[in-house]
Amino acid sequence: MGATVIDGNAVAEQLRAEIEEELRVLRLSAVRPGLATVMVGESFDAQAYEKHVRRLAEGLEYRYVSERLPADAELADVVATIGKMNADPRVTGVLVLQPLPEHVPEAAVNSALEPTKDIEAVHPLNAGLLAQGQPRFLPSTPASCFYLLDSYVTSQGHDASTYYSGRTLVVVGRSNSVGKPAQWLGLERNMTVITAHSRTAAAGRLGDFTRQADILIVAAGKPGLVTGEMVRDGVIAIDVGINAVKDASTGRTRMVGDLDFDGVAARAEAITPVPGGVGPITDVWLVGNAFAAAAMAQRVEPRFGLFR
Ligand code: NAD
């Protein structure tokens, strides 16, 4: 059986075009999104992500503010910078780029964000709202997984509002930004949810659980972690992992996911590639959330970033 390879770039472009259209309409009611990124240090990943997000935001004519602090900045400096963005009426969404230096505690940074500008839903209030099924914003990566899934199941003639009910979702990974919110989104869709993580693997039981998945979302950051013999025939497999590996034959570095792509594709109904799967949608979703924040500030009903 050949799996359908879901084209994340095409879905991302569709989402971007939808945001552009909504923006065109809502500009008439003075909705003007503004996105600020806060970067501490100069990690390659944070710089690359900032560049992507900036290009997208500016392409949609958002206001864009880039705040950069040195790697040795104290927590108080980071909190003060976030406070400045919280208070700036031109900024509707604030993103603190990861990774943060080790001496800057993530929880304190998250709590410093103004909840109405916390477009990744990392402030405890927003994470709590999400866990209770009343989200203000949907965090970009897990939301993108479900946007991709919705797009795929709809393309197969299913109704995305009922398709998930009673199916089994297995999430591999339990980070605050991906694994945990992905399980909450699955529960809201009436799925039976299993969350596996590094201790599941250490107990030698990862395959026992991944084999139960109708839909599998893997976000572990371990190249090729899930192989073909760890999934059931007909699974829909979403690969969030982004891992740089050196190709033994060419010596070049390339990006791979957490799925053993060929092995899983041989059994799956559908699969996302890396690169070109979840990643491109994530950036667009985040920018969409800054738009949703702007609309909410003007008391206009936004479509993006809200539970659908
Ligand atoms: P994280 O390091 O915070 O969490 C990783 C999770 O995976 C942990 O909960 C851990 O228990 C689990 N894990 C680790 N090893 C495991 C194993 N052998 N078996 C089972 N579970 C294991 O990472 P994160 O921020 O959640 O990101 C996960 C991956 O997704 C990374 O590769 C990251 O680069 C990628 N990512 C991609 C996007 C995107 O846009 N596509 C966005 C965010 C993260």
Image (spheres, grey):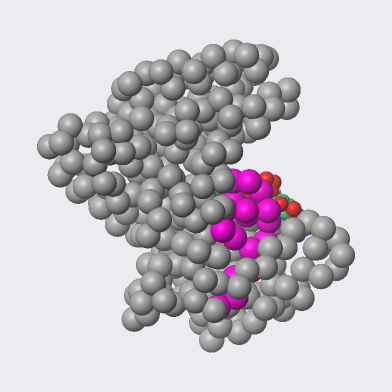
Measured as percent of width and height from the top left, residue 298 is found at 25, 34
What residue is shown at x 59% (from left), y 64% (from top)?
217
Q: Nearer the viewer, residue 220 or 214?
A: 214
Q: Is residue 92 positioned above or below 267 on the image?
A: above
Is residue 206 found left or right of 157 in the rendered image? right
What residue is shown at x 47% (from left), y 33% (from top)?
115
Q: Magenta residues, as a range?
A: 167-184
Q: Count the numbered circles shown.
A: 0
Q: Is residue 237 positioned above or below 57 on the image?
A: below
Measured as percent of width and height from the top left, residue 87 is found at 41, 18
Residue located farthest toward the right when viewing the structure as drawn = 203
Q: Nearer the viewer, residue 89 or 223?
A: 89
Measured as percent of width and height from the top left, residue 124 is found at 58, 38
Q: Nearer the viewer, residue 261 or 249?
A: 261
Residue located farthest toward the left when viewing the structure as drawn = 28
What residue is shown at x 52% (from left), y 50% (from top)?
130
Q: Is residue 303 visible?
A: yes
What residue is shown at x 78% (from left), y 56% (from top)?
198
Is residue 136 found left or right of 1 in the rendered image? left
On-image quarter of the C terminus: bottom left
Measured as percent of width and height from the top left, residue 126 is found at 51, 41
Q: Nearer the viewer, residue 113 or 57?
A: 113
On-image quarter of the N terminus: bottom right
Residue 182 inside the magenta-drawn segment: yes
Is residue 231 found left or right of 200 in the rendered image? left
Residue 289 inside the magenta-drawn segment: no
Q: Is residue 45 visible?
A: no
